[in-house]
Protein backbone atom coordinates (compact mmCIF):
# COMPACT_ATOMS: atom_id res chain seq x y z
CA UNK A 1 0.00 0.00 0.00
CA UNK A 2 2.74 2.39 0.68
CA UNK A 3 4.31 2.24 -2.89
CA UNK A 4 0.92 2.66 -4.55
CA UNK A 5 0.17 5.67 -2.38
CA UNK A 6 3.43 7.37 -3.33
CA UNK A 7 2.87 7.06 -7.09
CA UNK A 8 0.09 9.62 -7.32
CA UNK A 9 2.17 12.01 -5.28
CA UNK A 10 5.09 11.61 -7.66
CA UNK A 11 2.83 12.17 -10.64
CA UNK A 12 1.47 15.34 -9.13
CA UNK A 13 4.99 16.58 -8.49
CA UNK A 14 6.00 15.88 -12.09
CA UNK A 15 2.93 17.71 -13.36
CA UNK A 16 3.75 20.70 -11.21
CA UNK A 17 7.36 20.62 -12.41
CA UNK A 18 6.24 20.55 -16.02
CA UNK A 19 3.87 23.43 -15.41
CA UNK A 20 6.63 25.50 -13.85
CA UNK A 21 9.00 24.69 -16.71
CA UNK A 22 6.46 25.79 -19.32
CA UNK A 23 5.86 28.99 -17.48
CA UNK A 24 9.62 29.60 -17.26
CA UNK A 25 10.01 28.87 -20.97
CA UNK A 26 7.25 31.32 -21.75
CA UNK A 27 8.97 33.96 -19.66
CA UNK A 28 12.30 33.21 -21.38
CA UNK A 29 10.70 33.67 -24.82
CA UNK A 30 9.19 36.97 -23.78
CA UNK A 31 12.58 38.07 -22.45
CA UNK A 32 14.18 37.06 -25.75
CA UNK A 33 11.62 39.12 -27.66
CA UNK A 34 12.26 42.11 -25.44
CA UNK A 35 16.03 41.65 -25.88
CA UNK A 36 15.63 41.60 -29.67
CA UNK A 37 13.59 44.81 -29.55
CA UNK A 38 16.22 46.44 -27.34
CA UNK A 39 18.94 45.28 -29.72
CA UNK A 40 17.07 46.82 -32.66
CA UNK A 41 16.66 50.10 -30.81
CA UNK A 42 20.40 50.08 -29.95
CA UNK A 43 21.27 49.57 -33.63
CA UNK A 44 19.12 52.54 -34.59
CA UNK A 45 20.81 54.64 -31.89
CA UNK A 46 24.24 53.63 -33.21
CA UNK A 47 23.22 54.63 -36.74
CA UNK A 48 21.91 58.00 -35.48
CA UNK A 49 25.17 58.55 -33.52
CA UNK A 50 27.26 57.76 -36.59
CA UNK A 51 25.18 60.20 -38.68
CA UNK A 52 25.64 62.90 -36.01
CA UNK A 53 29.39 62.28 -36.00
CA UNK A 54 29.44 62.61 -39.80
CA UNK A 55 27.52 65.91 -39.67
CA UNK A 56 29.87 67.23 -36.94
CA UNK A 57 32.89 66.32 -39.06
CA UNK A 58 31.37 68.20 -42.00
CA UNK A 59 30.76 71.28 -39.80
CA UNK A 60 34.36 71.17 -38.53
CA UNK A 61 35.66 70.93 -42.10
CA UNK A 62 33.50 73.92 -43.17
CA UNK A 63 34.75 75.96 -40.23
CA UNK A 64 38.35 75.06 -41.03
CA UNK A 65 37.82 76.09 -44.66
CA UNK A 66 36.26 79.39 -43.51
CA UNK A 67 39.26 80.03 -41.24
CA UNK A 68 41.68 79.32 -44.12
CA UNK A 69 39.78 81.66 -46.44
CA UNK A 70 39.70 84.34 -43.74
CA UNK A 71 43.44 83.98 -43.26
CA UNK A 72 43.96 84.27 -47.00
CA UNK A 73 41.81 87.40 -47.11
CA UNK A 74 43.72 88.89 -44.18
CA UNK A 75 47.00 87.99 -45.85
CA UNK A 76 45.85 89.77 -49.00
CA UNK A 77 44.89 92.90 -47.05
CA UNK A 78 48.15 92.97 -45.03
CA UNK A 79 50.41 93.22 -48.08
CA UNK A 80 51.07 96.98 -47.74
CA UNK A 81 54.70 98.06 -47.32
CA UNK A 82 54.74 100.99 -44.91
CA UNK A 83 57.46 103.30 -43.67
CA UNK A 84 56.12 104.43 -40.33
CA UNK A 85 57.03 107.83 -38.86
CA UNK A 86 59.85 108.25 -36.36
CA UNK A 87 58.46 106.99 -33.04
CA UNK A 88 59.90 109.73 -30.80
CA UNK A 89 60.84 113.39 -30.53
CA UNK A 90 57.60 115.25 -31.42
CA UNK A 91 56.04 118.41 -30.03
CA UNK A 92 53.22 120.76 -31.01
CA UNK A 93 53.49 121.78 -34.65
CA UNK A 94 55.81 118.95 -35.67
CA UNK A 95 54.93 116.73 -38.61
CA UNK A 96 55.10 112.92 -38.64
CA UNK A 97 55.41 111.46 -42.14
CA UNK A 98 54.01 108.06 -43.12
CA UNK A 99 54.88 106.51 -46.51
CA UNK A 100 52.94 103.66 -48.15
CA UNK A 101 54.31 101.78 -51.18
CA UNK A 102 51.70 101.65 -53.94
CA UNK A 103 52.48 98.11 -55.06
CA UNK A 104 51.23 94.57 -54.50
CA UNK A 105 53.00 91.39 -55.53
CA UNK A 106 55.45 93.39 -57.64
CA UNK A 107 52.74 95.23 -59.58
CA UNK A 108 51.60 98.82 -59.23
CA UNK A 109 48.57 99.50 -57.05
CA UNK A 110 46.24 102.26 -58.19
CA UNK A 111 44.20 103.72 -55.31
CA UNK A 112 40.56 104.47 -55.95
CA UNK A 113 40.83 107.69 -53.90
CA UNK A 114 43.42 109.33 -51.67
CA UNK A 115 42.78 109.64 -47.95
CA UNK A 116 41.00 112.86 -47.03
CA UNK A 117 42.60 115.42 -44.80
CA UNK A 118 41.05 115.95 -41.39
CA UNK A 119 41.39 115.22 -37.71
CA UNK A 120 42.81 111.76 -37.08
CA UNK A 121 42.40 111.88 -33.30
CA UNK A 122 42.73 114.34 -30.44
CA UNK A 123 46.46 114.72 -31.10
CA UNK A 124 46.97 114.49 -34.84
CA UNK A 125 45.66 116.32 -37.89
CA UNK A 126 45.99 114.52 -41.22
CA UNK A 127 47.19 116.80 -44.00
CA UNK A 128 46.55 116.46 -47.73
CA UNK A 129 47.98 113.24 -49.16
CA UNK A 130 50.24 113.18 -52.17
CA UNK A 131 51.97 110.61 -54.40
CA UNK A 132 55.72 110.90 -54.89
CA UNK A 133 57.72 108.90 -57.46
CA UNK A 134 60.99 107.32 -56.31
CA UNK A 135 64.20 107.18 -58.38
CA UNK A 136 63.69 103.42 -58.84
CA UNK A 137 60.32 104.02 -60.53
CA UNK A 138 58.12 102.98 -57.61
CA UNK A 139 55.43 105.28 -56.25
CA UNK A 140 54.86 106.13 -52.60
CA UNK A 141 51.75 107.56 -51.00
CA UNK A 142 52.90 110.20 -48.50
CA UNK A 143 50.71 111.07 -45.52
CA UNK A 144 51.64 113.78 -43.04
CA UNK A 145 50.23 114.02 -39.53
CA UNK A 146 50.70 117.34 -37.73
CA UNK A 147 50.76 117.39 -33.93
CA UNK A 148 48.01 119.79 -32.81
CA UNK A 149 47.92 119.14 -29.07
CA UNK A 150 50.43 118.89 -26.24
CA UNK A 151 50.27 116.58 -23.24
CA UNK A 152 51.22 117.65 -19.75
CA UNK A 153 53.80 114.89 -19.64
CA UNK A 154 55.53 112.68 -22.18
CA UNK A 155 52.82 110.55 -23.81
CA UNK A 156 52.59 107.85 -26.46
CA UNK A 157 50.00 108.74 -29.09
CA UNK A 158 48.59 106.25 -31.63
CA UNK A 159 48.73 106.88 -35.35
CA UNK A 160 45.52 105.16 -36.43
CA UNK A 161 45.53 102.36 -38.95
CA UNK A 162 43.48 102.62 -42.13
CA UNK A 163 42.76 100.88 -45.42
CA UNK A 164 43.45 102.15 -48.92
CA UNK A 165 40.79 101.02 -51.35
CA UNK A 166 41.84 99.94 -54.82
CA UNK A 167 39.94 99.33 -58.07
CA UNK A 168 36.64 97.49 -57.90
CA UNK A 169 37.04 93.79 -57.20
CA UNK A 170 40.48 94.06 -55.57
CA UNK A 171 41.34 93.80 -51.90
CA UNK A 172 42.42 97.02 -50.18
CA UNK A 173 45.86 97.76 -48.77
CA UNK A 174 45.78 97.89 -44.99
CA UNK A 175 48.13 100.26 -43.20
CA UNK A 176 48.74 99.12 -39.63
CA UNK A 177 48.60 101.49 -36.69
CA UNK A 178 51.75 102.97 -35.18
CA UNK A 179 52.65 105.01 -32.13
CA UNK A 180 54.70 108.16 -31.60
CA UNK A 181 55.74 109.94 -28.43
CA UNK A 182 54.85 113.61 -27.91
CA UNK A 183 56.58 115.77 -25.35
CA UNK A 184 55.05 118.59 -23.30
CA UNK A 185 55.65 122.24 -24.08
CA UNK A 186 57.23 122.89 -20.67
CA UNK A 187 58.56 120.87 -17.81
CA UNK A 188 56.31 120.18 -14.88
CA UNK A 189 56.51 122.70 -12.01
CA UNK A 190 55.48 122.35 -8.40
CA UNK A 191 52.09 123.84 -7.49
CA UNK A 192 52.37 127.57 -6.85
CA UNK A 193 55.85 127.85 -8.34
CA UNK A 194 56.81 129.35 -11.67
CA UNK A 195 59.17 127.68 -14.05
CA UNK A 196 62.78 128.79 -13.56
CA UNK A 197 64.08 131.28 -16.10
CA UNK A 198 66.59 129.96 -18.56
CA UNK A 199 69.83 131.88 -19.05
CA UNK A 200 70.27 133.98 -22.15
CA UNK A 201 71.65 132.07 -25.03
CA UNK A 202 74.79 133.74 -26.38
CA UNK A 203 74.73 134.80 -29.98
CA UNK A 204 76.56 132.34 -32.20
CA UNK A 205 79.99 133.49 -33.25
CA UNK A 206 80.35 134.13 -36.94
CA UNK A 207 83.46 132.85 -38.62
CA UNK A 208 85.02 136.03 -40.04
CA UNK A 209 88.03 134.40 -41.71
CA UNK A 210 86.14 133.35 -44.88
CA UNK A 211 84.50 136.78 -45.03
CA UNK A 212 87.86 138.53 -44.67
CA UNK A 213 89.37 136.28 -47.33
CA UNK A 214 86.55 137.05 -49.78
CA UNK A 215 86.80 140.77 -48.98
CA UNK A 216 90.55 140.73 -49.63
CA UNK A 217 89.99 138.90 -52.91
CA UNK A 218 87.41 141.42 -54.12
CA UNK A 219 89.51 144.38 -52.95
CA UNK A 220 92.49 142.99 -54.84
CA UNK A 221 90.36 142.55 -57.92
CA UNK A 222 89.05 146.13 -57.54
CA UNK A 223 92.59 147.52 -57.14
CA UNK A 224 93.76 145.57 -60.18
CA UNK A 225 90.82 146.89 -62.19
CA UNK A 226 91.53 150.49 -61.12
CA UNK A 227 95.21 150.09 -61.92
CA UNK A 228 94.39 148.66 -65.32
CA UNK A 229 91.95 151.50 -65.99
CA UNK A 230 94.46 154.13 -64.91
CA UNK A 231 97.14 152.48 -67.02
CA UNK A 232 94.83 152.48 -70.01
CA UNK A 233 93.86 156.10 -69.41
CA UNK A 234 97.52 157.10 -69.14
CA UNK A 235 98.48 155.14 -72.22
CA UNK A 236 95.54 156.61 -74.13
CA UNK A 237 96.51 160.14 -73.09
CA UNK A 238 100.13 159.49 -74.03
CA UNK A 239 99.10 158.03 -77.37
CA UNK A 240 96.81 160.97 -77.99
CA UNK A 241 99.59 163.43 -77.22
CA UNK A 242 101.81 161.57 -79.60
CA UNK A 243 99.32 161.40 -82.48
CA UNK A 244 97.27 164.65 -82.35
CA UNK A 245 98.31 167.16 -85.03
CA UNK A 246 99.17 170.16 -82.84
CA UNK A 247 100.90 167.94 -80.27
CA UNK A 248 103.20 166.70 -83.05
CA UNK A 249 103.67 170.27 -84.31
CA UNK A 250 104.59 171.52 -80.85
CA UNK A 251 107.32 168.87 -80.57
CA UNK A 252 108.59 169.78 -84.03
CA UNK A 253 108.66 173.49 -83.14
CA UNK A 254 110.71 172.75 -80.04
CA UNK A 255 113.14 170.74 -82.16
CA UNK A 256 113.32 173.39 -84.93
CA UNK A 257 114.24 176.19 -82.56
CA UNK A 258 114.26 179.66 -84.22
CA UNK A 259 113.99 178.49 -87.87
CA UNK A 260 110.87 180.32 -89.15
CA UNK A 261 110.46 178.16 -92.24
CA UNK A 262 110.48 174.90 -90.22
CA UNK A 263 108.08 176.26 -87.65
CA UNK A 264 105.62 177.48 -90.31
CA UNK A 265 105.82 174.18 -92.22
CA UNK A 266 105.10 172.20 -89.01
CA UNK A 267 102.02 174.36 -88.32
CA UNK A 268 100.83 174.02 -91.94
CA UNK A 269 100.97 170.24 -91.65
CA UNK A 270 99.05 170.39 -88.36
CA UNK A 271 96.30 172.56 -89.91
CA UNK A 272 96.08 170.30 -92.97
CA UNK A 273 95.75 167.14 -90.81
CA UNK A 274 93.12 168.78 -88.63
CA UNK A 275 91.03 169.93 -91.63
CA UNK A 276 91.63 166.74 -93.64
CA UNK A 277 92.59 168.85 -96.65
CA UNK A 278 95.32 171.21 -97.90
CA UNK A 279 94.59 174.74 -96.70
CA UNK A 280 95.70 178.22 -97.81
CA UNK A 281 94.84 181.76 -96.75
CA UNK A 282 91.76 182.00 -98.94
CA UNK A 283 90.29 178.56 -98.08
CA UNK A 284 90.12 178.19 -94.28
CA UNK A 285 86.40 177.30 -94.15
CA UNK A 286 87.00 173.49 -94.13
CA UNK A 287 89.22 173.89 -91.05
CA UNK A 288 86.57 175.64 -88.95
CA UNK A 289 83.82 173.35 -90.27
CA UNK A 290 85.68 170.25 -89.13
CA UNK A 291 87.16 171.77 -85.95
CA UNK A 292 84.72 174.44 -84.73
CA UNK A 293 86.60 174.62 -81.43
CA UNK A 294 89.26 176.65 -83.32
CA UNK A 295 86.82 179.54 -83.90
CA UNK A 296 88.17 181.61 -80.93
CA UNK A 297 91.60 181.72 -82.63
CA UNK A 298 90.31 182.49 -86.12
CA UNK A 299 92.02 185.94 -86.32
CA UNK A 300 95.37 184.54 -85.19
CA UNK A 301 95.10 181.66 -87.67
CA UNK A 302 94.29 184.08 -90.54
CA UNK A 303 97.27 186.28 -89.62
CA UNK A 304 99.50 183.16 -89.48
CA UNK A 305 98.55 182.28 -93.04
CA UNK A 306 99.22 185.89 -94.14
CA UNK A 307 102.63 185.86 -92.49
CA UNK A 308 103.35 182.46 -94.00
CA UNK A 309 102.46 183.73 -97.50
CA UNK A 310 104.84 186.67 -97.00
CA UNK A 311 107.54 184.28 -95.75
CA UNK A 312 107.39 181.83 -98.65
CA UNK A 313 106.07 183.98 -101.56
CA UNK A 314 107.14 187.59 -100.77
CA UNK A 315 109.99 189.49 -99.15
CA UNK A 316 110.13 187.33 -96.07
CA UNK A 317 108.57 187.17 -92.66
CA UNK A 318 107.27 190.59 -91.50
CA UNK A 319 108.94 192.14 -88.51
CA UNK A 320 105.68 192.30 -86.58
CA UNK A 321 104.78 188.67 -87.35
CA UNK A 322 103.12 186.70 -84.50
CA UNK A 323 105.09 183.96 -82.76
CA UNK A 324 104.43 180.55 -84.29
CA UNK A 325 105.40 178.84 -81.03
CA UNK A 326 102.90 180.90 -79.01
CA UNK A 327 100.13 180.17 -81.54
CA UNK A 328 100.97 176.47 -81.50
CA UNK A 329 100.75 176.33 -77.69
CA UNK A 330 97.31 177.99 -77.79
CA UNK A 331 96.17 175.57 -80.47
CA UNK A 332 97.48 172.65 -78.40
CA UNK A 333 95.50 173.76 -75.34
CA UNK A 334 92.30 173.91 -77.38
CA UNK A 335 93.10 170.54 -78.99
CA UNK A 336 93.62 168.87 -75.58
CA UNK A 337 90.34 170.28 -74.33
CA UNK A 338 88.09 169.62 -77.32
CA UNK A 339 89.65 167.15 -79.71
CA UNK A 340 88.31 163.56 -79.50
Image: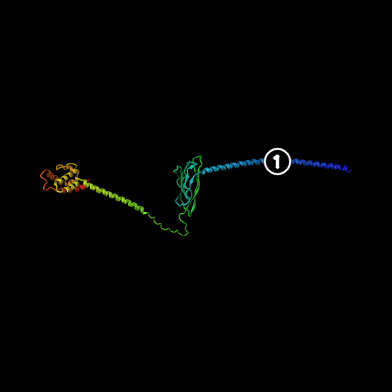
Q: Is residue 214 above or below residue 23?
A: below
Label 1 packing within 10 angstroms: few (<14), some (14-19), many (20+): few
Residue 322 percent across, percent down from the top left: 13, 48
Q: Is residue 136 above or below residue 205?
A: above
Q: Is residue 233 left or right of residue 326?
A: right
Total marks placed: 1
Q: Disc 1 marks which residue?
A: 39
Residue 191 percent across, percent down from the top left: 48, 59
Q: Is residue 194 above or below residue 135?
A: below
Residue 309 percent across, percent down from the top left: 13, 44
Give the quadrant of the C terminus: top left
Point 70% across, 41% down: residue: 39
Point 76% across, 41% down: residue: 28
Point 61% across, 41% down: residue: 57
Point 31% across, 51% down: residue: 220
Query: Of all residues shown, which one is farthest toward the bottom?
Result: 192
Residue 137 percent across, percent down from the top left: 45, 42
User: Callout 1: helix, strand or loop?
Assistant: helix
Give the quadrant of the N terminus: top right
Q: Nearer the viewer, residue 40 or 330?
A: 330
Q: Is residue 232 left or right of residue 65?
A: left
Amino acid sequence: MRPRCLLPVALCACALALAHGGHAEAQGGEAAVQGGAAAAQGGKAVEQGAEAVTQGSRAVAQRAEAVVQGRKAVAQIDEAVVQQPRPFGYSVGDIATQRVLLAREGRAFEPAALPEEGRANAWLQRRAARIEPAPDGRRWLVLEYQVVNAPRALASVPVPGWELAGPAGTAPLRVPAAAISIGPLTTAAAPGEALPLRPDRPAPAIATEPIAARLATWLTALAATLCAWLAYAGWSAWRTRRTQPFAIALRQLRAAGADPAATHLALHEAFDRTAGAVLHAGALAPLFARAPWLQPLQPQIARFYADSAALFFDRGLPADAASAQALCRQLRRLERRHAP
